[in-house]
Amino acid sequence: MHNHQEQQATQFGFITLGIESSCDETGIGLYHSEFGLIGHQLFSSVKIHAEYGGVVPELASRDHIQRVLPLIKVVLAEAKFTLQDLSGIAYTAGPGLAGALLVGAAVAKSLAWSLDIPSLAVHHMEGHLLAPLMEEPQPEFPFVALLVSGGHTMLIDVKAIGQYKILGESLDDAVGEAFDKTAKILGLGYPGGPALAMLAEQGNPDAFKFPRPMVDRPGLDFSFSGLKTFARNTFAKHPNKKADIAKAFEVAAAQTLMIKCRRALEQTKYTTLVVAGGVSANLSLRKELNQMGKKVGANVFYPRQEFCTDNGAMIALVGHFRLSHGQRDTHYEIDIKPRWNLEELSQIE
Ligand code: KG4
Ligand code: ZN
């Protein structure tokens, strides 16, 4: 670190800017070593993609280009900071859409270079995983983490920041993807997860019983593509029962996740469960997990609703942990990791 930065770090704290651009949301966060999260903004390009029924990668990239600098300006201005106050810049380097990731990486590295401060590549799923640390009370290590997003369904043994062992994952569709595809089958449009959850509220839970995939097999892996097929077949036979089908799907997905979480807690003997990623916003899932937690004596933690889905705050948080411990990018090339295994991450010393 330069002398000037060291001084800044002691006098004013360590200030990290976080940039998220892995999919269809541009997120910016600002994290202060003493005051925690001091600002964040999100711009979603979801409306642009809605007419195509899913994310169009090239449109997402172009939108990030337009949004990212204005959003950084807003976040800094609202927190009454300037670029010169920053101690480091973290950005999502993967996993995600290559073109979208490149926008955040290019902006982060160029800005960091021009300000003579370090930049750091952050793993998007580590962002989701640690997002509950921004809440009170905070979960304590070690814990089991259930990560449920549009691209991933994973159970992880988390011993400390950067010490991750994947206990189980989806063999086919991610659970968020299954929500989105089932919503599409029911004609609910994109993005489907929240729409399906809303419709399910009016559904009769006893109308249909969907299978709980893979719960009778040992292990902690998941499979959700069968649930979507079950929904398609049921809808073909009962086209007027949309809400009941949505309910049956949601309950089956939530209970399947709950059963595997219970098994992971038994296996690790941990008493803390952390749930994050877009689907952790689902209230039916939260209900199942909270009931199970009470039964087995485990505490369950979630991010606040707005930090369940993609955001810049979680990237600023991870950046803060790692940059303030001296981790940083070691070269100026703009490289991204559209595929990136969480287990490869380094521990914080
Ligand atoms: O974490 P996220 O914002 O992006 C990824 O990293 O994938 O997760 C998005 C996923 C989508 O599949 C979306 O449908 C789902 O999370 N989702 C929900 C809910 N809110 C978002 N699924 C079920 N119920 C919700 N309330
Ligand atoms: Zn995400």
Image (cartoon, helix red, strand yellow):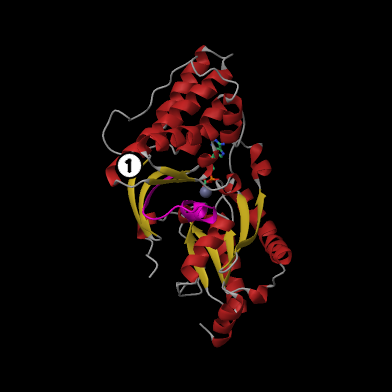
Is the C-beta of the residue carrying label 1 under 8 Å from the nearest atom of ligand 1? no
Image coords of residue 176 (percent x, y): 50, 38
Circle 1 — which element?
helix
The one nearer the camera, 148 or 298, is 298
Residue 82 in which image quadrant: bottom right
- State the residue at coordinates (51%, 65%): 319
Q: Where is residue 105 in the image (x, y as percent from the top left)?
A: 55, 64
Quarter holding ligand 1: top right
Q: Which residue is drawn at 69% across and 57% down?
A: 67
Name the side, left or right, on which 57 lies relative to 229.
right
> Residue at label 1?
264
Return the residue nearer the eye: 95 or 117.
117
The image quarter in which residue 240 lies: top right
At x 61%, y 29%, the residue is 198
| Amino acid type indicated by mark 1 | Ala
Q: What stretch is highlighted in magenta?
A: 127-147
